[in-house]
Image (cartoon, grey):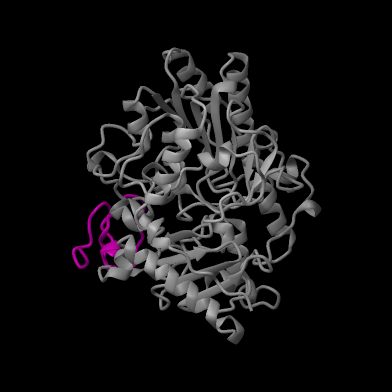
Amino acid sequence: MQTIQRREFLKRMGTGLAGFSILSLNSCTAPKVSPPNILFAISDDQTWKYTGISGCKYVKTPAFDRVAKEGVLFERAYAVAPQCSPSRASILTSRNIWQLEEAGTHASLFPKKFTVFTDMLEESGYQLGYTGKPWAPGNWKDAGWSRNPVGPEYNEKKMEAPKGISNTDYASNFKLFFEKRDASKPFFFWYGAHEPHRSYLKGAGIQQGKNPDDVDVPKYLPDVLEIRSDMLDFATEIEWFDMHLARILELLEKNGELENTLVVVTADNGMPFPRAKANLYDHGTHLPLAMRWPKKIKKNRKISDLVSFIDYAPTFLEVAGVQPHPDMIGKSLVPLLYSDKSGTIDAERDYVLTGRERHTHARPENFGYPSRAINTGKYLYIHNFKPDRWPAGDPFGSGDPEGFHDIDGCPSKTLLIDNQDKKGYKKYFEMAMAKRPESELFDLEKDPDCIENLAQVAEYQVTLSELKTRLFELLKVQGDPRVTGNGDIFESYPRFSRMRQFKGFKKRGEYNPTFK
Protein backbone atom coordinates (compact mmCIF):
# COMPACT_ATOMS: atom_id res chain seq x y z
CA MET A 1 0.00 0.00 0.00
CA GLN A 2 1.30 3.41 -0.92
CA THR A 3 1.41 6.01 1.85
CA ILE A 4 2.13 9.74 1.82
CA GLN A 5 5.57 10.97 2.86
CA ARG A 6 5.50 13.87 5.34
CA ARG A 7 7.54 17.01 4.63
CA GLU A 8 8.49 20.15 6.45
CA PHE A 9 5.40 21.86 5.10
CA LEU A 10 5.34 24.64 7.72
CA LYS A 11 8.55 26.01 6.26
CA ARG A 12 6.91 26.36 2.91
CA MET A 13 3.15 26.84 2.67
CA GLY A 14 2.42 28.20 6.09
CA THR A 15 4.68 31.22 5.84
CA GLY A 16 5.58 31.36 2.17
CA LEU A 17 9.29 31.69 3.08
CA ALA A 18 10.42 28.88 0.82
CA GLY A 19 8.80 30.60 -2.13
CA PHE A 20 10.70 33.77 -1.33
CA SER A 21 13.95 31.84 -0.93
CA ILE A 22 13.57 30.33 -4.37
CA LEU A 23 12.67 33.73 -5.78
CA SER A 24 15.79 35.31 -4.29
CA LEU A 25 18.05 32.52 -5.53
CA ASN A 26 16.59 32.64 -9.01
CA SER A 27 16.83 36.43 -9.16
CA CYS A 28 20.54 36.22 -8.39
CA THR A 29 21.37 33.57 -10.97
CA ALA A 30 19.07 34.35 -13.92
CA PRO A 31 20.31 36.63 -16.75
CA LYS A 32 18.66 40.02 -16.60
CA VAL A 33 15.91 40.61 -19.13
CA SER A 34 13.75 43.71 -19.47
CA PRO A 35 10.30 43.25 -17.93
CA PRO A 36 7.98 41.60 -20.45
CA ASN A 37 4.46 42.48 -21.36
CA ILE A 38 2.05 40.01 -19.76
CA LEU A 39 -1.07 38.74 -21.51
CA PHE A 40 -3.29 36.75 -19.16
CA ALA A 41 -6.06 34.91 -21.06
CA ILE A 42 -8.62 33.17 -18.87
CA SER A 43 -11.67 31.28 -20.07
CA ASP A 44 -14.76 30.83 -17.91
CA ASP A 45 -15.50 27.18 -16.91
CA GLN A 46 -13.07 24.90 -18.77
CA THR A 47 -11.61 21.66 -17.41
CA TRP A 48 -8.00 20.90 -18.32
CA LYS A 49 -8.53 18.08 -20.81
CA TYR A 50 -10.65 20.08 -23.28
CA THR A 51 -7.93 21.40 -25.59
CA GLY A 52 -6.53 20.01 -28.79
CA ILE A 53 -3.04 19.46 -27.43
CA SER A 54 -4.44 17.49 -24.50
CA GLY A 55 -6.00 15.02 -26.92
CA CYS A 56 -9.62 16.15 -27.11
CA LYS A 57 -10.88 15.15 -30.57
CA TYR A 58 -13.80 17.54 -30.82
CA VAL A 59 -12.31 20.79 -29.49
CA LYS A 60 -10.11 22.78 -31.85
CA THR A 61 -7.80 25.14 -29.96
CA PRO A 62 -4.99 26.16 -32.33
CA ALA A 63 -4.11 29.29 -30.33
CA PHE A 64 -3.83 27.46 -27.01
CA ASP A 65 -1.93 24.65 -28.72
CA ARG A 66 0.49 27.18 -30.23
CA VAL A 67 1.24 28.74 -26.85
CA ALA A 68 1.84 25.28 -25.38
CA LYS A 69 4.07 24.09 -28.24
CA GLU A 70 6.08 27.31 -28.35
CA GLY A 71 6.38 27.35 -24.58
CA VAL A 72 5.28 25.15 -21.70
CA LEU A 73 2.18 23.04 -21.08
CA PHE A 74 1.42 22.52 -17.39
CA GLU A 75 -0.27 19.16 -16.99
CA ARG A 76 -1.34 19.55 -13.34
CA ALA A 77 -2.48 23.12 -12.70
CA TYR A 78 -5.20 23.66 -10.10
CA ALA A 79 -7.54 26.50 -9.21
CA VAL A 80 -7.95 27.13 -5.50
CA ALA A 81 -11.75 27.12 -5.86
CA PRO A 82 -14.15 25.55 -8.39
CA GLN A 83 -16.12 28.82 -8.77
CA CYS A 84 -15.58 32.07 -10.67
CA SER A 85 -15.11 34.92 -8.20
CA PRO A 86 -13.30 33.03 -5.39
CA SER A 87 -10.89 31.55 -7.93
CA ARG A 88 -10.19 34.96 -9.48
CA ALA A 89 -9.70 36.55 -6.05
CA SER A 90 -7.09 33.90 -5.25
CA ILE A 91 -5.31 34.63 -8.52
CA LEU A 92 -5.17 38.35 -7.75
CA THR A 93 -4.07 38.05 -4.12
CA SER A 94 -2.02 34.83 -4.03
CA ARG A 95 -4.08 33.73 -1.04
CA ASN A 96 -6.38 30.77 -0.50
CA ILE A 97 -10.11 31.38 -0.25
CA TRP A 98 -10.20 30.73 3.49
CA GLN A 99 -7.78 33.67 3.84
CA LEU A 100 -9.93 36.11 1.86
CA GLU A 101 -12.98 36.64 4.06
CA GLU A 102 -15.93 37.77 1.85
CA ALA A 103 -13.92 37.30 -1.36
CA GLY A 104 -13.62 33.60 -0.55
CA THR A 105 -17.32 33.13 -1.24
CA HIS A 106 -19.07 33.47 -4.56
CA ALA A 107 -20.62 36.81 -5.60
CA SER A 108 -19.80 38.67 -2.40
CA LEU A 109 -17.50 41.61 -1.58
CA PHE A 110 -13.77 41.97 -2.31
CA PRO A 111 -12.26 43.58 0.82
CA LYS A 112 -10.01 46.51 -0.10
CA LYS A 113 -7.45 45.51 2.52
CA PHE A 114 -6.15 42.68 0.33
CA THR A 115 -3.24 43.55 -1.96
CA VAL A 116 -3.61 42.54 -5.60
CA PHE A 117 -0.70 41.96 -7.96
CA THR A 118 -2.25 44.19 -10.62
CA ASP A 119 -1.88 47.26 -8.39
CA MET A 120 1.70 46.28 -7.64
CA LEU A 121 2.50 45.96 -11.34
CA GLU A 122 0.92 49.34 -12.02
CA GLU A 123 2.97 50.94 -9.26
CA SER A 124 6.12 49.52 -10.86
CA GLY A 125 5.32 51.12 -14.23
CA TYR A 126 3.06 48.60 -15.96
CA GLN A 127 -0.05 49.70 -17.83
CA LEU A 128 -3.18 47.71 -17.02
CA GLY A 129 -6.31 46.80 -18.89
CA TYR A 130 -8.92 44.11 -19.22
CA THR A 131 -11.66 43.01 -21.56
CA GLY A 132 -14.55 40.64 -20.89
CA LYS A 133 -14.89 39.19 -17.41
CA PRO A 134 -12.52 40.50 -14.68
CA TRP A 135 -12.98 39.65 -10.99
CA ALA A 136 -16.65 38.71 -11.00
CA PRO A 137 -19.35 38.19 -10.01
CA GLY A 138 -19.37 40.32 -6.89
CA ASN A 139 -19.34 43.85 -5.50
CA TRP A 140 -16.05 45.75 -5.47
CA LYS A 141 -17.48 49.27 -5.29
CA ASP A 142 -19.01 48.92 -1.81
CA ALA A 143 -15.71 47.49 -0.58
CA GLY A 144 -13.90 50.73 -1.38
CA TRP A 145 -12.32 50.03 -4.77
CA SER A 146 -12.38 52.79 -7.39
CA ARG A 147 -12.32 50.17 -10.16
CA ASN A 148 -12.41 46.42 -10.55
CA PRO A 149 -9.33 44.90 -8.83
CA VAL A 150 -8.14 43.64 -12.23
CA GLY A 151 -7.72 47.17 -13.62
CA PRO A 152 -9.25 49.58 -16.19
CA GLU A 153 -12.03 48.26 -18.41
CA TYR A 154 -11.98 47.93 -22.23
CA ASN A 155 -15.34 46.53 -23.26
CA GLU A 156 -16.77 49.08 -25.67
CA LYS A 157 -16.13 47.17 -28.90
CA LYS A 158 -18.98 44.81 -29.82
CA MET A 159 -19.58 42.27 -32.58
CA GLU A 160 -22.20 39.88 -33.89
CA ALA A 161 -22.09 36.63 -31.99
CA PRO A 162 -24.05 33.37 -31.98
CA LYS A 163 -26.87 33.02 -29.47
CA GLY A 164 -25.58 32.30 -25.99
CA ILE A 165 -22.18 33.87 -26.65
CA SER A 166 -21.11 37.33 -25.47
CA ASN A 167 -21.09 40.03 -28.15
CA THR A 168 -18.02 41.65 -26.60
CA ASP A 169 -15.29 41.82 -29.25
CA TYR A 170 -12.45 40.84 -26.97
CA ALA A 171 -9.71 41.05 -29.59
CA SER A 172 -10.82 44.48 -30.82
CA ASN A 173 -10.91 45.74 -27.25
CA PHE A 174 -7.36 44.52 -26.75
CA LYS A 175 -6.40 46.34 -29.96
CA LEU A 176 -7.97 49.53 -28.57
CA PHE A 177 -5.91 49.18 -25.40
CA PHE A 178 -2.78 48.36 -27.39
CA GLU A 179 -3.11 51.43 -29.58
CA LYS A 180 -3.76 53.76 -26.63
CA ARG A 181 -0.92 52.49 -24.46
CA ASP A 182 2.45 54.15 -23.94
CA ALA A 183 4.70 51.96 -26.09
CA SER A 184 7.69 52.74 -23.88
CA LYS A 185 6.14 50.88 -20.93
CA PRO A 186 5.27 47.21 -20.45
CA PHE A 187 1.64 46.19 -20.07
CA PHE A 188 -0.43 43.64 -18.21
CA PHE A 189 -3.68 42.80 -19.99
CA TRP A 190 -6.39 40.46 -18.72
CA TYR A 191 -8.43 38.84 -21.49
CA GLY A 192 -11.33 37.27 -19.63
CA ALA A 193 -13.77 35.54 -21.95
CA HIS A 194 -17.31 34.82 -20.78
CA GLU A 195 -17.11 31.51 -22.63
CA PRO A 196 -17.61 28.59 -22.16
CA HIS A 197 -19.89 29.67 -19.29
CA ARG A 198 -23.51 28.69 -19.81
CA SER A 199 -26.03 29.06 -21.28
CA TYR A 200 -25.36 27.42 -24.68
CA LEU A 201 -27.33 27.35 -27.91
CA LYS A 202 -28.65 23.81 -27.73
CA GLY A 203 -27.43 21.72 -30.64
CA ALA A 204 -24.82 24.27 -31.75
CA GLY A 205 -22.04 21.70 -31.81
CA ILE A 206 -23.87 19.26 -34.06
CA GLN A 207 -25.03 22.15 -36.27
CA GLN A 208 -21.38 23.06 -36.76
CA GLY A 209 -20.62 19.55 -37.96
CA LYS A 210 -19.14 18.13 -34.78
CA ASN A 211 -19.53 14.37 -34.39
CA PRO A 212 -21.15 13.03 -31.20
CA ASP A 213 -19.14 9.83 -31.67
CA ASP A 214 -15.96 11.79 -30.90
CA VAL A 215 -17.10 12.64 -27.37
CA ASP A 216 -15.45 10.82 -24.49
CA VAL A 217 -18.16 11.15 -21.83
CA PRO A 218 -16.85 11.45 -18.24
CA LYS A 219 -17.69 8.42 -16.11
CA TYR A 220 -19.89 10.50 -13.80
CA LEU A 221 -22.36 11.22 -16.64
CA PRO A 222 -24.52 8.78 -18.63
CA ASP A 223 -23.21 8.07 -22.10
CA VAL A 224 -26.24 9.14 -24.12
CA LEU A 225 -26.75 11.49 -27.08
CA GLU A 226 -28.18 14.29 -24.90
CA ILE A 227 -24.94 14.43 -22.90
CA ARG A 228 -22.73 14.11 -25.96
CA SER A 229 -24.57 16.96 -27.66
CA ASP A 230 -24.24 19.14 -24.56
CA MET A 231 -20.50 18.45 -24.53
CA LEU A 232 -20.25 19.49 -28.18
CA ASP A 233 -22.05 22.76 -27.39
CA PHE A 234 -19.49 23.30 -24.62
CA ALA A 235 -16.74 22.76 -27.19
CA THR A 236 -18.05 25.46 -29.54
CA GLU A 237 -17.69 28.08 -26.80
CA ILE A 238 -14.13 27.01 -25.95
CA GLU A 239 -13.36 27.55 -29.62
CA TRP A 240 -14.83 31.07 -29.45
CA PHE A 241 -12.43 31.90 -26.61
CA ASP A 242 -9.54 30.43 -28.59
CA MET A 243 -10.48 32.34 -31.75
CA HIS A 244 -10.14 35.69 -29.96
CA LEU A 245 -6.86 34.55 -28.42
CA ALA A 246 -5.55 33.80 -31.91
CA ARG A 247 -6.50 37.32 -33.05
CA ILE A 248 -4.72 38.87 -30.07
CA LEU A 249 -1.57 36.83 -30.68
CA GLU A 250 -1.64 37.83 -34.35
CA LEU A 251 -1.90 41.52 -33.44
CA LEU A 252 1.05 41.25 -31.06
CA GLU A 253 3.09 39.37 -33.64
CA LYS A 254 2.40 41.90 -36.42
CA ASN A 255 3.50 44.71 -34.13
CA GLY A 256 6.69 43.01 -33.01
CA GLU A 257 5.59 42.58 -29.38
CA LEU A 258 4.83 38.88 -29.16
CA GLU A 259 8.40 37.77 -28.47
CA ASN A 260 8.61 40.02 -25.41
CA THR A 261 5.21 39.06 -24.03
CA LEU A 262 4.66 36.42 -21.40
CA VAL A 263 1.47 34.77 -22.65
CA VAL A 264 -0.50 32.80 -20.05
CA VAL A 265 -3.65 30.89 -21.05
CA THR A 266 -5.84 29.18 -18.48
CA ALA A 267 -9.40 29.02 -17.04
CA ASP A 268 -11.00 29.96 -13.73
CA ASN A 269 -12.74 26.68 -12.79
CA GLY A 270 -14.02 23.45 -14.24
CA MET A 271 -16.68 22.69 -16.81
CA PRO A 272 -20.33 23.60 -16.08
CA PHE A 273 -21.68 20.07 -15.81
CA PRO A 274 -23.02 18.05 -12.87
CA ARG A 275 -20.22 16.92 -10.48
CA ALA A 276 -17.64 19.22 -12.14
CA LYS A 277 -17.96 22.98 -11.60
CA ALA A 278 -18.56 23.93 -7.93
CA ASN A 279 -17.08 20.58 -6.84
CA LEU A 280 -13.61 19.72 -5.55
CA TYR A 281 -13.32 16.67 -7.76
CA ASP A 282 -10.63 16.77 -10.42
CA HIS A 283 -12.94 18.04 -13.16
CA GLY A 284 -13.89 21.02 -10.98
CA THR A 285 -10.40 22.33 -10.21
CA HIS A 286 -7.89 20.78 -12.66
CA LEU A 287 -7.55 23.37 -15.42
CA PRO A 288 -5.65 24.08 -18.65
CA LEU A 289 -2.46 26.14 -18.43
CA ALA A 290 0.10 27.05 -21.07
CA MET A 291 2.77 29.76 -20.99
CA ARG A 292 4.95 31.23 -23.73
CA TRP A 293 7.83 33.75 -23.57
CA PRO A 294 10.56 32.88 -26.09
CA LYS A 295 13.17 35.13 -24.47
CA LYS A 296 13.17 33.00 -21.33
CA ILE A 297 11.02 29.88 -21.78
CA LYS A 298 12.34 26.95 -23.78
CA LYS A 299 9.65 25.57 -26.04
CA ASN A 300 7.80 22.29 -26.42
CA ARG A 301 7.95 21.20 -22.80
CA LYS A 302 5.37 19.54 -20.59
CA ILE A 303 5.65 20.07 -16.85
CA SER A 304 3.95 17.68 -14.45
CA ASP A 305 4.64 19.55 -11.19
CA LEU A 306 1.57 20.39 -9.10
CA VAL A 307 0.97 24.13 -9.39
CA SER A 308 -1.70 26.29 -7.82
CA PHE A 309 -3.37 29.46 -9.02
CA ILE A 310 -1.93 31.27 -5.98
CA ASP A 311 1.38 30.86 -7.85
CA TYR A 312 0.43 33.31 -10.63
CA ALA A 313 0.91 36.55 -8.68
CA PRO A 314 4.48 35.86 -7.46
CA THR A 315 5.35 34.65 -10.97
CA PHE A 316 4.12 37.83 -12.65
CA LEU A 317 5.79 40.01 -10.05
CA GLU A 318 9.11 38.21 -10.38
CA VAL A 319 9.31 38.55 -14.15
CA ALA A 320 8.46 42.23 -13.67
CA GLY A 321 11.25 42.62 -11.13
CA VAL A 322 8.88 43.29 -8.22
CA GLN A 323 9.13 41.63 -4.79
CA PRO A 324 5.87 39.87 -3.82
CA HIS A 325 3.79 41.28 -0.99
CA PRO A 326 4.52 39.50 2.34
CA ASP A 327 0.92 38.28 2.55
CA MET A 328 1.19 36.41 -0.74
CA ILE A 329 1.72 32.71 -0.02
CA GLY A 330 2.09 31.35 -3.56
CA LYS A 331 5.35 30.04 -4.97
CA SER A 332 6.76 31.60 -8.14
CA LEU A 333 6.68 29.42 -11.25
CA VAL A 334 9.78 31.14 -12.64
CA PRO A 335 12.19 28.29 -11.73
CA LEU A 336 9.96 25.90 -13.68
CA LEU A 337 9.62 28.27 -16.61
CA TYR A 338 13.35 28.97 -16.88
CA SER A 339 14.30 25.30 -16.61
CA ASP A 340 15.10 23.25 -19.70
CA LYS A 341 13.51 20.14 -18.22
CA SER A 342 10.16 18.45 -18.71
CA GLY A 343 8.21 16.23 -16.33
CA THR A 344 8.74 16.77 -12.61
CA ILE A 345 11.15 19.62 -11.89
CA ASP A 346 10.55 20.65 -8.27
CA ALA A 347 10.00 17.62 -6.05
CA GLU A 348 8.78 19.85 -3.21
CA ARG A 349 5.66 20.70 -5.21
CA ASP A 350 4.00 17.61 -3.81
CA TYR A 351 0.50 18.95 -3.08
CA VAL A 352 -2.06 21.64 -3.81
CA LEU A 353 -4.96 22.78 -1.63
CA THR A 354 -8.45 23.58 -2.85
CA GLY A 355 -11.70 24.58 -1.18
CA ARG A 356 -15.19 25.91 -1.56
CA GLU A 357 -17.80 27.75 0.47
CA ARG A 358 -21.15 29.10 -0.74
CA HIS A 359 -21.76 28.95 -4.49
CA THR A 360 -25.30 30.11 -5.30
CA HIS A 361 -28.30 30.69 -3.02
CA ALA A 362 -29.04 26.98 -3.00
CA ARG A 363 -30.09 26.22 0.60
CA PRO A 364 -32.24 27.68 3.40
CA GLU A 365 -30.54 30.47 5.39
CA ASN A 366 -28.23 31.05 2.39
CA PHE A 367 -25.97 28.26 3.67
CA GLY A 368 -23.04 27.06 1.60
CA TYR A 369 -21.37 23.69 1.29
CA PRO A 370 -17.96 24.09 2.98
CA SER A 371 -15.26 21.67 1.83
CA ARG A 372 -11.47 21.57 1.69
CA ALA A 373 -9.17 19.22 -0.19
CA ILE A 374 -5.54 18.22 -0.54
CA ASN A 375 -4.28 16.79 -3.82
CA THR A 376 -0.91 15.02 -3.97
CA GLY A 377 -1.10 14.06 -7.62
CA LYS A 378 -1.65 10.44 -6.64
CA TYR A 379 -4.48 10.98 -4.14
CA LEU A 380 -7.24 13.49 -3.62
CA TYR A 381 -8.66 13.80 -0.11
CA ILE A 382 -11.82 15.92 0.36
CA HIS A 383 -13.22 16.91 3.74
CA ASN A 384 -16.88 17.97 3.74
CA PHE A 385 -17.54 20.01 6.87
CA LYS A 386 -21.34 19.82 6.62
CA PRO A 387 -22.20 16.37 5.24
CA ASP A 388 -25.80 16.79 6.38
CA ARG A 389 -26.31 19.40 3.63
CA TRP A 390 -27.06 18.71 -0.02
CA PRO A 391 -23.78 19.27 -1.95
CA ALA A 392 -25.49 20.61 -5.07
CA GLY A 393 -28.13 22.55 -3.16
CA ASP A 394 -31.50 21.55 -1.75
CA PRO A 395 -33.81 19.73 -4.17
CA PHE A 396 -36.89 21.77 -3.22
CA GLY A 397 -37.92 25.05 -1.64
CA SER A 398 -36.34 27.61 -3.95
CA GLY A 399 -39.47 28.64 -5.79
CA ASP A 400 -37.97 27.35 -9.05
CA PRO A 401 -39.08 24.15 -10.83
CA GLU A 402 -35.63 22.57 -10.54
CA GLY A 403 -33.59 22.55 -7.36
CA PHE A 404 -29.91 21.68 -6.92
CA HIS A 405 -28.96 25.24 -7.88
CA ASP A 406 -25.22 24.82 -7.36
CA ILE A 407 -25.34 23.04 -10.73
CA ASP A 408 -25.81 25.43 -13.65
CA GLY A 409 -29.10 24.96 -15.46
CA CYS A 410 -28.40 22.80 -18.50
CA PRO A 411 -29.68 19.84 -20.53
CA SER A 412 -27.36 17.46 -18.66
CA LYS A 413 -28.74 18.50 -15.28
CA THR A 414 -32.36 18.30 -16.44
CA LEU A 415 -31.75 14.86 -17.91
CA LEU A 416 -30.50 13.54 -14.56
CA ILE A 417 -33.36 15.09 -12.58
CA ASP A 418 -36.09 13.91 -14.95
CA ASN A 419 -34.74 10.35 -15.01
CA GLN A 420 -33.44 10.02 -11.46
CA ASP A 421 -35.50 6.93 -10.65
CA LYS A 422 -34.88 5.12 -13.92
CA LYS A 423 -32.44 2.28 -14.35
CA GLY A 424 -29.24 3.51 -15.95
CA TYR A 425 -29.61 7.06 -14.58
CA LYS A 426 -30.04 6.75 -10.82
CA LYS A 427 -26.34 6.28 -10.04
CA TYR A 428 -25.41 9.37 -12.07
CA PHE A 429 -28.08 11.43 -10.37
CA GLU A 430 -26.79 10.33 -6.97
CA MET A 431 -23.15 11.06 -7.84
CA ALA A 432 -24.10 14.63 -8.69
CA MET A 433 -26.87 15.43 -6.21
CA ALA A 434 -26.96 12.98 -3.28
CA LYS A 435 -25.49 13.78 0.13
CA ARG A 436 -21.84 12.88 0.61
CA PRO A 437 -19.83 11.52 3.54
CA GLU A 438 -17.50 13.71 5.57
CA SER A 439 -14.39 12.11 4.04
CA GLU A 440 -13.78 11.27 0.41
CA LEU A 441 -10.58 9.73 -0.99
CA PHE A 442 -9.76 9.06 -4.64
CA ASP A 443 -6.83 7.51 -6.46
CA LEU A 444 -6.36 10.02 -9.28
CA GLU A 445 -4.01 7.79 -11.26
CA LYS A 446 -6.53 4.95 -11.43
CA ASP A 447 -9.70 7.03 -11.17
CA PRO A 448 -9.26 10.56 -12.62
CA ASP A 449 -13.04 11.03 -12.85
CA CYS A 450 -13.28 10.53 -9.06
CA ILE A 451 -15.94 7.82 -9.05
CA GLU A 452 -14.78 5.33 -6.37
CA ASN A 453 -14.56 6.75 -2.85
CA LEU A 454 -11.85 4.79 -1.00
CA ALA A 455 -12.39 6.43 2.37
CA GLN A 456 -13.97 3.31 3.89
CA VAL A 457 -11.61 0.79 2.28
CA ALA A 458 -9.40 -0.86 4.91
CA GLU A 459 -6.14 -0.80 2.97
CA TYR A 460 -6.36 2.99 2.46
CA GLN A 461 -6.89 3.99 6.10
CA VAL A 462 -3.25 4.99 6.68
CA THR A 463 -3.26 7.16 3.57
CA LEU A 464 -6.60 8.68 4.58
CA SER A 465 -5.35 9.51 8.08
CA GLU A 466 -2.10 11.03 6.82
CA LEU A 467 -3.83 13.20 4.26
CA LYS A 468 -6.50 14.42 6.66
CA THR A 469 -3.87 15.27 9.28
CA ARG A 470 -1.73 17.09 6.75
CA LEU A 471 -4.69 19.03 5.37
CA PHE A 472 -5.87 20.18 8.78
CA GLU A 473 -2.37 21.18 9.89
CA LEU A 474 -1.94 23.32 6.78
CA LEU A 475 -5.37 24.90 7.19
CA LYS A 476 -4.62 25.68 10.83
CA VAL A 477 -1.32 27.37 9.94
CA GLN A 478 -3.13 29.43 7.31
CA GLY A 479 -5.83 30.51 9.76
CA ASP A 480 -8.80 28.83 8.10
CA PRO A 481 -11.87 29.67 10.25
CA ARG A 482 -13.27 26.23 9.50
CA VAL A 483 -10.51 24.66 11.63
CA THR A 484 -9.85 27.49 14.11
CA GLY A 485 -13.36 27.58 15.57
CA ASN A 486 -15.12 30.36 13.65
CA GLY A 487 -16.26 28.57 10.51
CA ASP A 488 -19.79 29.98 10.61
CA ILE A 489 -18.40 33.41 9.67
CA PHE A 490 -18.63 32.23 6.05
CA GLU A 491 -22.41 31.88 6.42
CA SER A 492 -22.66 35.59 7.29
CA TYR A 493 -21.11 37.01 4.15
CA PRO A 494 -23.46 38.83 1.78
CA ARG A 495 -24.42 37.62 -1.67
CA PHE A 496 -25.01 40.21 -4.40
CA SER A 497 -26.31 37.88 -7.11
CA ARG A 498 -29.80 36.39 -7.30
CA MET A 499 -31.53 35.23 -4.10
CA ARG A 500 -34.27 32.58 -4.18
CA GLN A 501 -37.33 31.88 -2.04
CA PHE A 502 -35.76 29.44 0.41
CA LYS A 503 -36.78 29.69 4.05
CA GLY A 504 -34.69 31.79 6.38
CA PHE A 505 -32.29 34.61 5.57
CA LYS A 506 -32.46 35.80 1.95
CA LYS A 507 -31.64 39.51 1.90
CA ARG A 508 -29.55 40.29 -1.14
CA GLY A 509 -26.36 42.21 -0.43
CA GLU A 510 -26.69 42.04 3.37
CA TYR A 511 -24.85 40.18 6.10
CA ASN A 512 -26.69 37.42 7.92
CA PRO A 513 -26.68 38.80 11.49
CA THR A 514 -27.07 35.33 13.02
CA PHE A 515 -23.50 34.41 12.08
CA LYS A 516 -21.71 37.74 11.89
Quadrant of residue 59 within the rendered picture:
top right
Which residue is farthest bottom? 458
Q: Where is residue 491 in the image (x, y as percent from the top left)?
A: 29, 64
Q: Nearer the viewer, residue 232 or 187?
A: 187
The answer to whether residue 503 is visible is no
Q: Nearer the viewer, residue 396 or 305?
A: 305
Can you say which quadrant of the picture contains the N terminus? Answer: bottom right
Q: Position of residue 79 (x, y in %)?
A: 49, 52
Q: Which of 369 and 111 is in front in this view?
A: 111
Q: Nearer the viewer, residue 162 or 186?
A: 186
Q: Position of residue 176 (x, y in %)?
A: 48, 17
| Magenta-span inclusion, residue 501 | yes
- Name the chief secondary structure element in magenta: loop
The answer to whether residue 200 is visible is yes
What residue is shown at x 48% (from left), y 78% (from top)?
A: 465
Taking 508 as reference, is 168 above or below it?
A: above
Horizontal side of 328 relative to 413 (left or right) equals: left
Horizontal side of 345 relative to 395 (left or right) equals: right
| Magenta-span inclusion, residue 282 | no
What residue is shown at x 42% (from left), y 17% (from top)?
A: 185
Q: Position of residue 224 (x, y in %)?
A: 74, 63
Specify start and end residues of the magenta stretch as a single range: 487-516
Horizontal side of 315 relative to 302 (left or right) equals: left
Taking 274 as reference, is 331 above or below it?
A: above
